[in-house]
Image (cartoon, grey):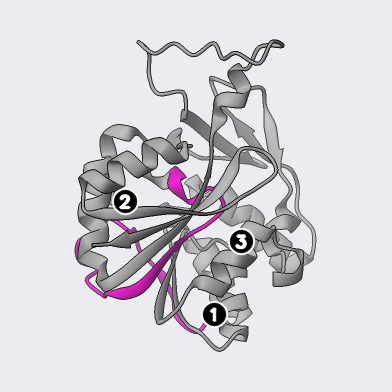
Amino acid sequence: METTLLTTDKDPMGAAIADYFNHHKANRLQVFSSQFDEDEIPVRQLFRNAKTMPLLERTALQLANGSILDVGAGSGCHAIALQEMGKEVCAIDISPLSVEVMRQRGVTNARLINLFDEQFVDTFDTILMLMNGSGIIGRLENMPAFFRRMKMLLRPGGCILMDSSDLRYLFEDEDGSFEIDLAGDYYGEIDFQMQYKDIKGDSFDWLYIDFQTLSLYAAEYGFKAELVKEGKHYDYLAKLIMG
């Protein structure tokens, strides 16, 4: 697994977050993929508060307990909500600009660190992976390394709260059947690249995983997967409990 950090010249999302925080507005944060049309992320949504978060995210924040690790924390919206609930949270991100904004926004424990950096040896009761938290796993072939890392970071009885989406709806025909190439790559493995103004990031792998596949991998590596809640559009929140 990649253990690198971003540099500011390759950190489009961090630049967008910093602009919005400092100037209360931001340009378009563009998203490119070889599998999809060009899209964009509304930067103001990265600053949402608990009241405007989707139900899956609010549910995860309620369930998170003990010492909490917020992975890929971005602007710190989840960490701030947890702090307001009186919970103990460590927020990490690989974006230096995002971490600086988190600190300025009042996130008590915000760190510039990669989840897979083995020099990061703290342990937690809850690992929170929201905004399609499965994405940072990248590809299914990284699942063994991911669960090994989770076992190192979780305390006995600890859990992961992760949301994701089942992209099978993209392959649904009018008659309700699905056209998925079972001989090809897993249909939830996507490549993305972001650009903000003249800052273009490197291409990266991003994983959307259906709950059944997630459950199978979890069981293989000693975790029990529970489907906590389903959203309105093939999205869901899962709780992975370390056995």
Residue 113 sits in which quadrant? Answer: bottom left
Position in image of residue 230 (x %, y %): 60, 48
Asked whether residue 133 is drawn in magenta, I would say: yes
What SS does tag 3 mark? helix
Q: Residue at x 47, y 36 (%)?
A: 210
User: Three-letter amino acid code at disc 1?
Assistant: Val
Asked whether residue 218 is drawn in magenta, I would say: no
Position in image of residue 243 (x %, y %): 23, 62
* In the depicted structure, whether residue 55 falls above or below residue 209: below
Question: Which numbered marker is on residue 43?
Answer: none
Q: Residue at x 56, y 83 (%)?
A: 83
> Does residue 28 appear left or right of residue 146 in this picture?
right
2 vs 1, front mark: 1
Q: Residues within 10 Å of mark 1 (few under 14, many from 20)?
A: many
Which segment is the magenta one? 107-135
Which residue was labeled with disc 3?
57
Q: Is residue 38 visible?
A: yes
User: Three-letter amino acid code at disc 2?
Assistant: Thr
Residue 2 sits in which quadrant? Answer: top left
User: Three-letter amino acid code at disc 3?
Assistant: Glu
Number of callouts: 3
The N terminus, quarter of image: top left
Earlier sequence position, callout 1 versus callout 3:
3
- Gap between marks 1 and 3, in whole Å? 18 Å
Question: Which numbered marker is on residue 4?
Answer: 2
Position in image of residue 190 (x %, y %): 48, 29
Q: Residue at x 21, y 49 (%)?
A: 221
Which residue was labeled with disc 1?
107
